[in-house]
């Protein structure tokens, strides 16, 4: 056991805001091998599939209880014309995926295939509509095609393509990165567009859309301010409810520069700490955007949707630079666990977050081999699985009266221990990350307001931060039972080794 000991207090009876399950959301873009080769292999593939959708991928993701899946982009969304992706596959027109490698997109994975994927996963669809190069009519008709019942031109078209019943679609994105790849608009111009598009994305029957305006990059608070200002001018006063229900923001963890983001697997300890400092800034990001929103929406009725987050490294050597394929190490897992603690603390405003991206792109859960088809679960996958009990749980405040251990990284200080906790259905879940590369720590919880029992614990760690999983070593970084936990007289002691992620579960009486 180490000498570093951190006292912490949790009042298990003082429930904070509910952690929206949608902060464990996902993102699948027509980019590299995320859709084709990742989720979708086509009906003729030797890989077991249903309607072309890989069943091993579905099975692995079902274990995560993923709450929603954002599609078809990303930058691709603002070039995507949904009508090209319906009807007989051999009659669907092709296009060039100009953003991502200039490859040909044959539109074989379209609306019906995406909705079938969501049904297989048991997840909610989040559709990102085309504002950049589409039309209001096109988006409006997509909503009608998907969600309208009865009889109408789009309903007849849907039925002709084999789907009688409307689907339920709640989450609807009004464009993506409209300050950049989604149209290079100014904030003021986009705010007008968002209102216009939102107007014609109708609610059909009891299908109520949750419209998400395309938000800021990183710390561009002025973008959020413009969206909020415009929203309160008209929508709130005249309509039954605001024209859009949330604004998005994107923030990637990049340790180097956009030109040279560093290797996913070959990095030193300095780069590791720099990564953690960047990831920790997500707290500042959410606080900043939320503060701006508070000026216009004190009651927090408009949500923040962080619909792209995660690590972004240089692509794996020898792979297409436009495919954004990267390895995933224990470092990525700790970036994820740190993000989740921050998300839990922002449960009052953060309604959704989507890691970029689920399969074979950026900080993926699953990597598939392009030749053998072998599937590997990444260290990040395991963080999602170990933390899934926080979905829809009440957040619990964790107080650390003596502060947290920290270290100097360049000109900033990094807290090297991160903790969050929640309760649901009489169960306590505590997540702990020790970000220190070398020092172990003991966290000693004083659990008040309830009697906690039957604790069990798991740990995700490895000999080195660079370790990752591969087809010949699929469990190099995988959760194991953690024994170094003790509970006596309401005091829970958890030993958290250097560079590790630990979860502790227990009953509350
Ligand atoms: O996730 C990859 C890309 O990053 C998305 O397409 C875009 O929205 C963002 O810039």
Image (cartoon, rainbow, N blue to C red):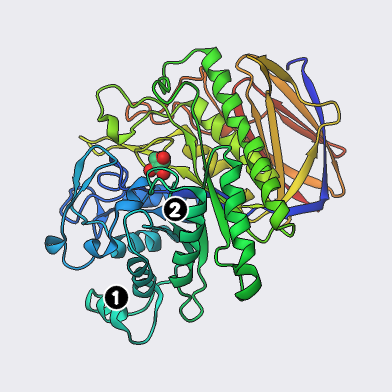
Q: Residue at x 76, y 32 (%)?
A: 486
Q: In the image, is 459 to the left or to the right of 291?
A: left
Q: Residue at x 40, y 74 (%)?
A: 147
Q: Position of residue 216 (x, y in %)?
A: 53, 44
Q: Residue at x 46, y 58 (%)?
A: 173
Q: Which residue is label 1 attached to? A: 163
Could you say which disc has been placed on residue 177 in the image? none
Q: Nearer the viewer, residue 310 or 419?
A: 310
Q: Position of residue 360 (x, y in %)?
A: 34, 38
Q: Which residue is label 2 attached to? A: 62
Q: Is residue 355 above or below residue 117?
A: above
Q: Give the CA separation, mark 2 to mark 1.
A: 24 Å
Q: Position of residue 219 (x, y in %)?
A: 58, 37
Q: In the image, is 492 to the left or to the right of 136?
A: right
Q: Quadrant of residue 17?
A: bottom right
Task: Ligand 1: give its quadrant.
Answer: top left
Please rate how many residues cluster around mark 2, counting C-alpha atoms within 10 Å: few if below 14, some from 14 to 19, many from 20.
some
Q: Position of residue 203 (x, y in %)?
A: 48, 75
Please rate how many residues cluster around mark 1, counting C-alpha atoms within 10 Å: few if below 14, some from 14 to 19, many from 20.
some
**Visible residue check, residue 207:** yes
Q: In the image, is 57 to the left or to the right of 398?
A: left
Q: Nearer the viewer, residue 114 or 488?
A: 114
Q: Residue at x 16, y 66 (%)?
A: 88
């Amino acid at each position: 056991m180490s000498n570093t000991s951190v006292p912490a207090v949790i009042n298990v009876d003082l429930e904070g805001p509910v952690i929206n399950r949608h902060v464990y959301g996902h993102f699948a873009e027509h980019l590299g091998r995320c859709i084709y080769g990742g989720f979708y292999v086509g009906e003729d593939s030797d890989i077991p599939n249903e309607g072309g959708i890989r069943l091993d991928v579905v099975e692995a993701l079902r274990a995560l209880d993923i709450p929603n899946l954002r599609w078809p982009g990303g930058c691709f969304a603002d070039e995507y014309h949904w009508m090209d992706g319906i009807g007989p596959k051999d009659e669907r027109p092709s296009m060039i995926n100009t953003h991502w490698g200039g490859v040909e997109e044959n539109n074989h994975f379209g609306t019906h295939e995406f909705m079938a994927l969501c049904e297989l996963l048991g997840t909610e669809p989040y559709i990102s509509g085309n504002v950049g190069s589409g039309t209001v009519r096109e988006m409006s008709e997509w909503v009608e095609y998907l969600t309208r019942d009865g009889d109408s031109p789009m309903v007849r078209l849907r039925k002709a393509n084999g789907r009688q019943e409307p689907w339920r679609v709640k989450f609807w994105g009004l464009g993506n990165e409209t300050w950049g790849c989604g149209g290079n608009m100014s904030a003021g111009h986009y705010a007008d567009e968002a209102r216009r598009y939102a107007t014609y994305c109708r609610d059909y029957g009891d299908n109520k859309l949750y419209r998400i305006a395309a938000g800021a990059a990183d710390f561009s608070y002025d973008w959020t301010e413009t969206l909020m200002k415009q929203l309160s001018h008209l929508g709130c006063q005249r309509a039954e409810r605001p024209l859009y229900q949330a604004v998005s923001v994107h923030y990637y963890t990049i340790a180097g520069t956009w030109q040279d983001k560093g290797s996913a697997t070959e990095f030193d300890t300095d780069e590791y700490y720099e990564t953690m400092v960047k990831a920790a800034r997500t707290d500042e990001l959410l606080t900043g955007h939320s503060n701006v929103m508070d000026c216009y929406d004190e009651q927090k009725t408009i949500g923040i949707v962080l619909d792209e987050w995660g690590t972004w490294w240089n692509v794996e050597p020898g792979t297409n630079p436009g495919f954004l394929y990267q390895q995933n190490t224990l470092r990525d897992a700790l970036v994820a666990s740190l993000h989740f603690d921050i998300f839990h603390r922002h449960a009052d405003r953060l309604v959704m977050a989507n890691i970029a991206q689920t399969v074979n792109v950026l900080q993926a859960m699953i990597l598939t081999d392009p030749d053998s088809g072998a599937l590997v679960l990444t260290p990040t996958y395991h963080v999602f699985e170990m933390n899934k009990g926080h979905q829809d749980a009440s957040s619990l405040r964790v107080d650390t009266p003596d502060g947290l251990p920290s270290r100097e990284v360049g000109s900033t200080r990094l807290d090297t221990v991160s903790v969050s906790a929640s309760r649901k259905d009489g169960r306590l879940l505590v997540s702990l990350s020790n970000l220190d590369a070398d020092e172990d720590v003991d966290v000693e919880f004083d659990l008040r307001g309830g009697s906690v029992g039957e604790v069990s614990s798991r740990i995700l760690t490895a000999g080195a931060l660079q370790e990752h999983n591969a087809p010949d070593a699929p469990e190099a970084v995988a959760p194991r039972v953690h024994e170094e936990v003790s509970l006596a007289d309401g005091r829970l002691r958890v030993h958290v080794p250097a560079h590790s992620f630990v979860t502790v579960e227990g009953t509350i009486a």
